[in-house]
Image (cartoon, helix red, strand yellow):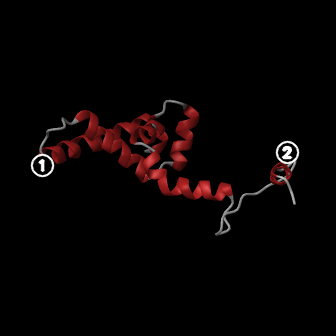
C-alpha cells in the first residue's frame, strides 16, 4: 500500500512535462478561455475603449481603424455623445432631436479628421 506522500508525488508533474488541459467536451484551456472571452466580449469592451480606438491621434492606430473599425465602434461613440453631451433628464423626443443633429456632425468631423476615410 502506498503512503500519502508517495501517492502525492505521483500527482506532481515534472516541470518539463508538456500538459494540455482538456475539458469533457474536448476544449483546451486556451479554447475555454477564448469561449469565455467571446461570450463576454461585448460587456468587457466599454464604449470608452471603442471610442478611444476610433478617435486615437496615433497614426498607426488610425491606419488600423480605417481597415478594421466596426459598426459597434461607431455605435459606442454615439452612446458616448448621448452620455456626455445630452443632459440625463432630457425627454426622449428632445434626446432624439439632439442626437439627430449631433451624430451627423460627429461623423462629418471624423471624416475630416481622417481624410482617407471620406
Q: Is 41 on the left-hand or right-hand side of 82?
A: right
Q: Residues within 10 Å of mark 2 (few under 14, many from 20)?
A: few
| Image height of 82 relative to 41, above or below | above
Residue density around tag 1, few if under 14, some if 14–19, many if 20 or more, within 10 Å: few
Q: Tell me if 8 is positioned left or right of 35 in this view.
A: right
| Observer-nearest of 39 and 98 | 39
Q: Nearer the viewer, residue 98 or 33?
A: 33
Q: Are marks 1 and 2 in contact (CB under 8 Å)?
A: no
Using residue 116 as the reference point, say whether residue 48 is left or right of it: left
Question: In the image, is residue 109 above or below residue 70?
Answer: above
Residue 100: x and y, percent? 22, 46
Which labelled disc corresponds to residue 61?
A: none
Residue 101 is situated, as x and y percent measured from the top left of the image, at 21, 42
Q: Which residue is mark 1?
A: 93
Horizontally, residue 10 falls left or right of residue 90, namely right
Q: Which mark is residue 15?
A: 2
Q: Splitting the image into 4 quarters, where does residue 27 fall? A: bottom right
Residue drawn at x 64%, y 69% as measured from the top left: 25
Q: Which residue is depicted at the point 29% across and 38% down?
A: 81
- Determine whether the residue tagged by mark 1 lies in a helix, strand or loop: helix
For the view shown, which residue lies furthest in the top direction?
Answer: 57
Q: Residue at x 14, y 48 (%)?
A: 92
Mark closest to the chain's N terminus, 1 or 2: 2
Q: Residue at x 18, y 35 (%)?
A: 87
Q: Which is closer to the viewer, label 1 or label 2?
A: 2
Residue 40 is situated, as x and y percent measured from the top left of the image, at 48, 53
Give how far across and how far down residue 55 sits, in percent. Answer: 44, 35
Which one is nearer the viewer's eye here, 21 or 49?
Answer: 21
| C-alpha distance separating marks 1 and 2 | 64 Å
Identify the element where label 2 is drawn.
loop
Amino acid at each position: 500500500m502506498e503512503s500519502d506522500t508517495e501517492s502525492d508525488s505521483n500527482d506532481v508533474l515534472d516541470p518539463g512535462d508538456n500538459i494540455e488541459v482538456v475539458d469533457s467536451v474536448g476544449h483546451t484551456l486556451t479554447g475555454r478561455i477564448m469561449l469565455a472571452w467571446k461570450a463576454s466580449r461585448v460587456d468587457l469592451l466599454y464604449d470608452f475603449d471603442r471610442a478611444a480606438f476610433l478617435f486615437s491621434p496615433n497614426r498607426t492606430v488610425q491606419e488600423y481603424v480605417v481597415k478594421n473599425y466596426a459598426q459597434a465602434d461607431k455605435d459606442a461613440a454615439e452612446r458616448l455623445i448621448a452620455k456626455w453631451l445630452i443632459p440625463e433628464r432630457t425627454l426622449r423626443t428632445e434626446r432624439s432631436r439632439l442626437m439627430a443633429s449631433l451624430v451627423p456632425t460627429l461623423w462629418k468631423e471624423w471624416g475630416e479628421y481622417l481624410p482617407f476615410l471620406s
